[in-house]
Amino acid sequence: MLSKINLLLLTALAPAVWGTTYLVTTELLPPDRPLLAAVLRSLPAGLVLLLLLRRLPAGSWWWKSAVLGLLNFGAFFALLFIAAYRLPGGVAAMVGAVQPLLVTVLAARVLGERLGPVKLGAGMAGIAGVGLLVLSADARLDAAGVLAALGGAASMAAGIVLTKRWQPPAGPLTSTAWQLVAGGVFLVPVMLAVEGPALPAFTGANLAGYLYLALVGTVLAYWLWFRGIGRLPATGVSFLSLLSPVVAAVAGAAVLGEAFSPGQLAGLALILGALVASNASALDVGSRWPGRARRRDVTRSASSPRSVP
């Protein structure tokens, strides 16, 4: 059995991997086919997983898998790519950073998780940190792009909360397969209507990019993600998504050979502070300091009737 901190670190690998998506998309995938990328990222991987696992949903999980697949993959992927094509990456990342705040509010209403000033403050700090990290002074706004980014954040937030509330009866890998197929089936007609049925001539680099996004960026990452949602507070898990723009910024700086400015370093500090504050209960820092643990034990023994001679 994994400890909470180890489970949290493994779950954090998912948004860290998602942070490489922009670099892979721009460097390896064919241009101007965002919805094709979304379909190839979800449907083939989901079908292969279903063939390997040989388990279909039962009862209400047919429609629940369809709803979760639409929220976590179908609508989210479509809105994500629309925002990416209509907004600068920094603007899209900053708007998307509202997702932890949305999850915090939804989890309080739907799951009964505590809505406190620390979580709300961490959510605001996360948005500010992402803004400092990735937002440029000449960033332009596009109304449709901003709405798409907000819609994508809301879709994923609802998906996180409902995944936690419904608790799929199968393991996270099986549940991921069901949702990938449902999301892919939703995306196919949208792709055909927007981009048409013609496929580009795929190069080796294109195929490598699609394979990476499907296997690592989707199957592996979402398996870790859904497993974390099932075992950790939904709000804490949602804040891990702030790691995506961090990894994207670091990867971009590494490729371009750029150094971080003081403002970007301040943004990194704010994001890391928001992550620690929002996951303080999972980290359980106090119990890991022997001195503090001993002081609590002494206090308990002093107040216990057995300590009276």
Image (cartoon, rainbow, N blue to C red):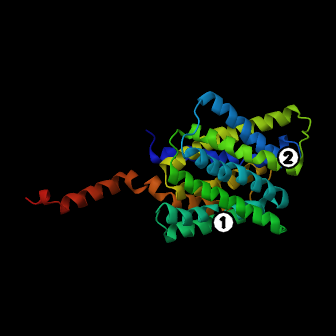
Task: Name the residue type under label 1.
Answer: Ile
- Residue 216 in view: yes
Check residue 30 in the rendering and tell me which mark sits there, or answer none: none
Marks 2 and 1 close (CB-CB < 8 Å): no
**Quadrant location of the C terminus in the rendered image:** bottom left
State the image coordinates of residue 58 (x, y, percent, origin top left). Answer: 54, 40
Q: Which residue is mark 1?
A: 127
Q: Is residue 101 above or below residue 285?
A: below
Around disc 2, counting alpha carbons within 10 Å, would you say few (fewer than 14), some (14 to 19), or many (20 or more)?
few
Query: Which residue of the protein is positioned furthest toward the left in this rendering?
Result: 309
State the image coordinates of residue 259 (x, y, percent, origin top left). Answer: 76, 55
Tell me the SS state at disc 1.
helix
Around disc 1, counting alpha carbons within 10 Å, would you say few (fewer than 14), some (14 to 19), or many (20 or more)?
many
Left or right of residue 194: residue 1: left
Q: Nearer the viewer, mark 2 or mark 1?
A: 2
Left or right of residue 116: residue 145: right
Q: Which residue is mark 2?
A: 192
Which residue corresponds to the image point at 35% horizontal and 51% vertical from the top-left?
A: 290
State the image coordinates of residue 11 (x, y, percent, origin top left). Answer: 57, 46
Which circle's residue, 2 or 1, is located before the other in the chain? 1
State the image coordinates of residue 109 (x, y, percent, origin top left). Answer: 51, 66
> Which of these two is toward me, 108 or 122?
108
Task: Name the residue type under label 2.
Answer: Leu
Residue 202 position by quadrant:
top right
Left or right of residue 26: residue 300: left
- Residue 261 in view: no
